[in-house]
């Protein structure tokens, strides 16, 4: 049997769009929540085409991956199930540079 206690629990007090260390994220994505597509942009100013974005469902399964190239990239999510998805921007060595989440509503 497992018991959960609310004592000592607290919410994170962090502004949206900022990482834990304080600087603003450089990768933009919209709309959030989304239903048919999500657009990623503003990455060409800082990252080269050897970087990739991976999208994972809530269970951790990779559902999509693309390499940066143009100034923006539109992902068709019309076949995605409703829920929360995580994205990770990775450098050419596979290290996570940025990450975030978006919601699919249908």
Image (cartoon, rainbow, N blue to C red):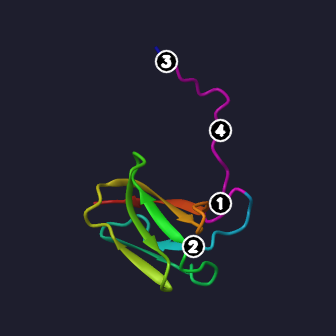
Q: Which residue is mark 1?
A: 15
| Mark with earlier residue (1, 4) | 4
Up/down of 63 relative to 8, above or below: below
Q: Left of 39 or right of it: where is 18?
A: right
Along the horizontal axis of the image, is 18 left or right of 77?
Answer: right
Query: Are circles 2 and 4 on residues that touch, CB within 8 Å?
Result: no
Q: Residues within 10 Å of mark 3 (few under 14, many from 20)?
A: few
Magenta range is: 3-20
Quadrant placement of the C terminus? bottom left
Of callouts 3 and 1, the N-terminal one: 3
For the residue labelled by badge 4, is the local secondary structure a helix, a strand or a loop? loop
Front label number (3 vs 1): 3
* Cα separation between marks 3 and 2: 40 Å
Q: Which residue is tagged 4?
A: 10
Instruction: Name the residue tied to disc 3.
Output: 2
Residue 92 in picture, x, y percent from top left? 58, 69
Q: Residue at x 68, y 29 (%)?
A: 8
CB within 8 Å, label 1 to label 4: no
Looking at the image, is mark 2 or mark 1 earlier in the sequence?
1
The part of the image, by quadrant, that contains residue 11 is top right
- Specify whether residue 6 is painted magenta: yes
Looking at the image, which is closer to me, 73 or 29?
A: 73
Q: Residue at x 74, y 58 (%)?
A: 21
Q: CA distance from mark 3 to mark 4?
A: 20 Å
Q: Disc 1 and disc 4: Cα gap in Å? A: 15 Å
The mark closer to the camera, 3 or 2, is: 2
Q: Mark 2 = which residue? A: 27
């Amino acid at each position: 049997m497992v018991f959960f206690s609310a004592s000592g629990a607290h919410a994170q007090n962090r502004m949206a769009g900022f990482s834990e260390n304080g600087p603003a994220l450089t990768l933009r994505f919209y709309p959030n929540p989304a239903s048919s597509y999500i657009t990623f942009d503003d990455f060409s100013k800082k990252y080269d085409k050897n970087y990739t974005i991976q999208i994972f469902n809530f269970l951790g399964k990779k559902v999509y991956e693309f390499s940066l190239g143009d100034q923006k990239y539109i992902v068709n999510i019309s076949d995605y199930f409703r829920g929360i998805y995580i994205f990770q921007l990775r450098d050419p060595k596979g290290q996570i540079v940025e990450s975030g989440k978006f919601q699919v509503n249908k």
